[in-house]
Image: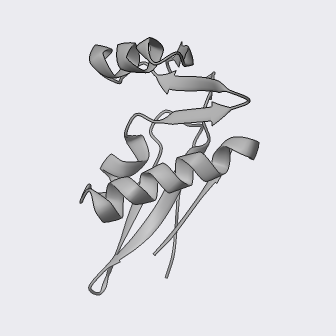
Amino acid sequence: GAMGASGGRRIWTAVLQSLVHHIDQGMSLQQAVQAPRIHVEDGDVMVDGRFEYDTISGLKSRGHNVTIVNPRYDVAPYAEPNGIAVDGADLRSAVYPVAKTTMAVGY
């Protein structure tokens, strides 16, 4: 399989979290790329607003500077991953559903 993203400095966190969700947590590729994520840079923690309240409040209670963001089509606070997984003879494609029109293809 393969995975990539657009999004500058935020690419590696999006791709890494998506791969961990897919490989280690057993999510489908589509579930993995659209799962809530975080990005840490310069001491700030950017947290997807889809995380549960307890997760966000736990980060704040530990002293993290948390900014809650809600991804939407016209604002992309995170990189926008997409990927391809091989399932036997089939290719499974997944795209970040909030992103601009994009796709992952393979042969």
Camera-side residue of 105 and 76:
76
The image position of residue 15, as x and y in percent, is 54, 54
| Residue farthest along the front direction in this orientation | 62
Seen at 45% across and 18% down, the residue is 62
The image position of residue 65, as x and y in percent, is 59, 15
Seen at 39% across and 71% down, the residue is 85
| Residue farthest along the bottom direction in this orientation | 89
Camera-side residue of 51 and 35:
51
Colour approach in the figure:
one colour
Camera-side residue of 17 and 91:
17
Regarding residue 73, the answer to whether it shows in the image is no
- Above or below, 85 against 71 in this view is below
Seen at 42% across and 12% down, the residue is 61
Relative placement, left or right, of 106 versus 34 is right
Regarding residue 100, the answer to whether it shows in the image is yes
Q: How many marks?
A: 0
Relative placement, left or right, of 101 versus 94 is right
Seen at 52% across and 62% down, the residue is 104
Relative placement, left or right, of 85 versus 6 is left
Give the image quarter of residue 53.
top left
Q: Quadrant of the N terminus?
A: bottom left
Camera-side residue of 25 and 42:
42
The image position of residue 51, as x and y in percent, is 35, 24
Relative placement, left or right, of 1 versus 11 is left
